[in-house]
Amino acid sequence: NENYKASIAKNVEPILDLSFKSLFIRYVDFLNGVNVPSHKHKPKDIKTIKGYITSIKLFKTALKVSEIEVGSMLITEIGDVEVGYFHDYLTKTMKDDGSPKFSPRTYNNKVADNRAFFNFIKDKLGINITNPFDDVRKKFIKRKNFTIELTEFDQLLKVVTKNNGEYEINDRNKTYKRNHYRKWLKDAYKLALYTGERRDGIVLMKWSFIDMEERIITLPNYKVNRIQDIDKDRLIPITLDLFELLNNMGYKRLKGSEEYVICPQHENRTTIREWISKSFSHYWLLNKFNPEISFRHLRKTYVTLIYSQFGDKTKAVTDQNVDTILEYYLNKKTIVSQAKNLSLYDLEARNNVA
């Protein structure tokens, strides 16, 4: 690695160290934009970068368990055998209670992160290797596209109080009292339900994005823009519920301003984002509702309800293709249950009239 840096400083073509350890360091630099031309760098948040690093270190750990020190191996020496050890580690390692330590979703993510590492070596560094992770089959994941009943949501809002927000954390054998409550939490939860936005969209939304006359919010599609390195907006309809919420939050006074809609006085928006999701889970469980529900299910609820009205045209509202909506977001049970009050004869009559 020192030879590589010295070569860069002298502006000559560096001689690549093909050891796994050296290339791993190069990859971490690449993720952080070190020695990457600005026009080719796709910024990633710290959490994403840490995820990649953790996955590759887990690959090293898996091989170490099998008494293989991968760090000193040449990248060209790593193939199906080593990936097989990783597969066994992810599928056969158990917790103390006898349950699998790694879920199918985690398996897929760890494999995908290591595949990305080897693609970097092959495509970005131009090293002639075959990616040993290309042939790894994804684990089947049974998706549970839960949605939230609106009566449950109303009940959730009732328990969002300071008294109910108390919890304890343990740190270095000491117990500290903390509180999830923030006075703006209810508005944040409502904004998420009424817009179908992810956390980034909620915490980065500004009043200048909102046009109450056109009844539209023009909001950057933060996730898609970050992944694809593009600049794309999502148009969010201002429904009656959302119209009332925004007015109650002070739209007339703040119209057109660059203030954030949620907790504008706090500069660290990442902190706001974490507060929202963690507090939601805390208050949700107080009602003894489905423990598998989390903040992200507000978006699934929104998409399901919009789909029930607009069908395939929902993609214009959620800025997603129909296949994605059907596979990842839609609670099909909710949609199917709406057919119980339909008559095929009525449908035929409507079609004939049309």
Image: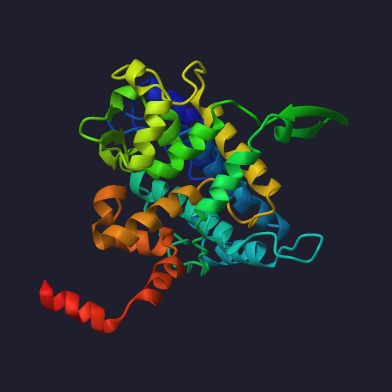
Looking at the picture, the colour scheme in use is rainbow
> In the image, is 31 to the left or to the right of 73?
left
Residue at horizontal 26 percent and vertical 40 percent from the top: 235
Residue at horizontal 11 percent and vertical 74 percent from the top: 353
Q: Which residue is more in the foreground, 329 or 101?
A: 329
> Residue 150, how many percent across, how many down?
50, 52
> In the image, is 258 to the left or to the right of 116?
left
> Residue 279, how many percent across, how many down?
62, 37
Residue at horizontal 41 percent and vertical 51 percent from the top: 302
Instruction: Please say if 113 is above or below 137.
Output: above
Q: Work out whether residue 278 can be spotted.
A: no
> Residue 285, how many percent across, how many down?
68, 48
Q: Work out whether residue 350 can be spotted.
A: yes
Q: Residue furthest right?
A: 173
Residue at horizontal 76 percent and vertical 60 percent from the top: 95
> Number of callouts in the render?
0
Instruction: Please say if 156 is above or below 203.
Output: below
Give the quadrant of the C terminus: bottom left
Q: Which residue is more in the foreground, 55 or 266?
A: 266
Q: Residue furthest bottom?
A: 345
> Residue 184, how many percent across, how many down?
54, 27
> In the image, is 68 to the left or to the right of 324?
right
Q: Which residue is more in the foreground, 107 or 189?
A: 189
Instruction: Please say if 258 is above or below 329.
Output: above
